[in-house]
Amino acid sequence: MTDINAAACALVAAITKQARQNLGLTLDEMADMLGYEGEHRRQMMHRVEIGERRLREPQRRLIEAYLHGYRPSDWPR
């Protein structure tokens, strides 16, 4: 990974974590809202937040929609 790619991954990771915190969601809840499934969904979300796993474009768009007030019917709480 180049230095630029590493820096970009770190930035996306930090922004993703901040977005989750701004939305008041736990790792499990954010994982559910982004479509991660199974017993390792929390770990997958954590890996996104530390830059080890890429955030896919559809997931990025969902986060953006959530930050702008969209809430699906299965939104936590």
Image (cartoon, grey):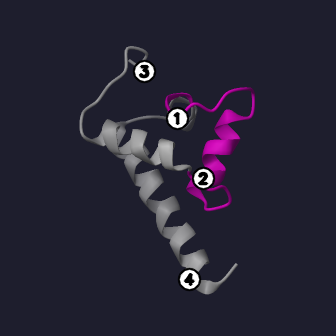
Where residue 24 appears, as percent x and y from the top left, is 37, 36
Question: Which mark lies nearer to you, 4 or 3?
Answer: 4
Q: Which mark is residue 34?
A: 1
Q: Residue at x 32, y 38 (%)?
A: 65
Which residue position holds label 2?
Answer: 48
Front one among 69 and 46:
69
Where residue 33 appears, as percent x and y from the top left, is 49, 30
Residue density around tag 1, few if under 14, some if 14–19, many if 20 or more, within 10 Å: some
Residue density around tag 3, few if under 14, some if 14–19, many if 20 or more, within 10 Å: few
Question: Which mark lies nearer to you, 2 or 4?
Answer: 4
Dot 3: what SS? loop
Where residue 12 appears, as percent x and y from the top left, is 48, 62
Quadrant of the rendered image containing residue 42? top right
Q: Whole-Å distance between the Cαs marked 2 and 1? A: 11 Å
Which residue position holds label 3?
Answer: 76
Quadrant of the rendered image containing residue 53? bottom right
Q: Whole-Å distance between the Cαs marked 2 and 4? A: 17 Å
Which residue position holds label 4?
Answer: 4
